[in-house]
Image: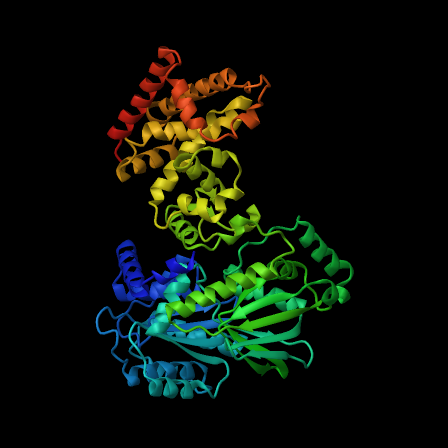
Amino acid sequence: MNQTDLLKIDPVVELNQLIKEISLTENIHPDEAFILWFLQTYLVDNKEEALASITGRSNDKALDAIYVDHKARQVNLIQGKYRVKGAEKAELASEVVRFAQLGRLVTDEKDNLSEVIKSADASIVEKLHGARKQYRNKGYEINLFYVTTGRISTSTLREAKAIVEHNSSINFISFHGNAIKKLITDYIMGAAPAVPILELEVEGPLIMTRHDPDNEIDSYVFTMKGKNIGDLVNKGGSRIFARNIRGFLGDDTAVNRSITETLKSEPHNFWYFNNGVTIICDEAHECSTAGKKALRIREPYIINGQQTARTLNRFGNDQATLLVKVISIPRSEDQKDYQKYETLVSQIVTATNWQNKIVASDLKSNDREQIRIERELRKLGILYIRKKMSKKEAKSTAVIKPRYIIKKEDLAQAVASVVLDPFYARSGKEPLFETDLYKQIFPYNRDICEYLTYYHLARVCSYEKDKDADKWGCWLATHILWKNLKGKLKTKSMRKNFVYAYERRNHYWDHICNPLHLATSKIYVGIRKFYKDNSKSKDGKHIGEQTFFKYKNRHNQFESFWQTTPKKRQKLYKNNLDKFIRALEEFEL
């Protein structure tokens, strides 16, 4: 996403649209939809887990959700206020303070929790007692999130934080006013949900620090045990890699094999052989845990060293240590500053990720439109892979059990074959992600059903290809097929009918899908003849199929050629296409 697009984002409008959509889809009150949005944006990917965390009851004692994150070993208590009007109104100090006191009640030695929440619903009481048990028996942290589209005064925040500051295991975290705007922008940019807070245990006594007064950036360099870096993956899951441009590439890459071999054969030399891990975060400060020096960081992302961290998570041991660099980059809520932040992070990611080659498609993996496509397809039960990763990784990190999978590179080729000269789709996948072509293939907010229509038409053509000329002429066939169908598939309802029927083609084969395939087969007959009649260059040299279809403007040349083909073939093509259209028009979802 370029800087101009980022400035066009109106976080308030985006949030209100999202809350309205969630409220209608889940049939819940907008206040609960706001809590669900926050849970999914900041704490948990899985919608079912987020819904189960919402209390949704009266007399809930200022508690809207309880979410226990066992991987991060944290209990999250959430209170929210969704204000469409009066957003500038300050929250009542008494309500904010009462919520902060809840954290103290959960952690105090004195068992007075039941007395305080005696009017609360039994399920909420049970969850709060469960939270206390996790804290006392397993050492879980308690995070108190007060989330409002209004604002909280400085004096009220100071008072609330003073209530919990006696216990380092309790964190009072507020999202109010402009902080909500920053969070919705993070959501749009695909950097949410984040990992709220982590502690990095330092190996040895030394932390080297650097302060950049011009940008107010603080950096920390120190050594950590490999096992502890691997544990970050357990705590943060895939969320901690959200700002990385790739996923885990699997165990079979040369780099990952080398990492694994060093861990197994020379763990004591790992510090020397490995480039380490780079983490960015919003805030960082030094602290101590169990008598050891540590760095406490908020909203961390591993932007370099994902392959190392993932491998350490699987094969790490106490003997291996590595270098860790933490860059704490403050963010204001101003959109221009956020734009500057995104640009800086993107530059750091690109500059530090060099061991595995970065290509154009990698750099577009976190683009706003790619993130939107992923989310929209997820609602339809389709897994969209926008980052380069192994298939195993893609399936293991998916928050749905997908009906099928689409890779962004495959979608790019399908769209390019339709909206551009098919020469570009034929030229390969990576050039399609260069800026000029990318904007035409993935303009922001293209109808998701339009993307799927192009994708499935390309699948029809891929299925029907037979000989070598078909293989290299596949994108030409897709272009011609769409040109003859776009007048009928221009409406959203017709595109929906096509996508629905083709996704279930075994059921709708005879009267909908088969005529389309038969028409496509006639296009290929024409393409073969088109190649055969034009496979000699001006100087009489033979042109191979692979080279022939690399030339621009073949689609226009083919259309002229098609008019000269036998009328019987043209008639068969038209009859099958008409049969397909009629069936689609009569089809009812």
- What residue occupies the far front of the structure in this picture? 539
Q: Nearer the viewer, residue 258 or 424?
A: 424
- Residue drawn 36% across the image and 22% down it: 515
The quadrant of the picture occupied by the C terminus is top left
Q: Nearer the viewer, residue 101 or 233?
A: 233
The spot of residue 244 in percent (x, y) is 53, 59
Instruction: Tell whether 23 sits left or right of 441.
Output: left
- Residue 501 quadrant: top left
Is the residue 262 above or below the residue 450 in the image?
Answer: below
Is the residue 420 above or below the residue 335 in the image?
Answer: above
Instruction: Tell whether 507 sits left or right of 109.
Output: left
Disc count in the image? 0
Residue 520 in view in this figure: no
- What residue occupies the far left of the structure in this picture? 85
- Residue drawn 42% across the image and 70% down it: 337
Instruction: Tell whether 151 sits left or right of 301.
Output: left
Q: Nearer the viewer, residue 467 or 292?
A: 467
The quadrant of the picture occupied by the N terminus is bottom left
Residue 457 in view in this figure: yes
Instruction: Tell whether 90 sits left or right of 507.
Output: left
In the rendered view, how is the structure colored? rainbow
- Residue 576 quadrant: top left
Q: Nearer the viewer, residue 583 or 480?
A: 480
The spot of residue 552 in percent (x, y) is 47, 31
The spot of residue 231 in percent (x, y) is 60, 66
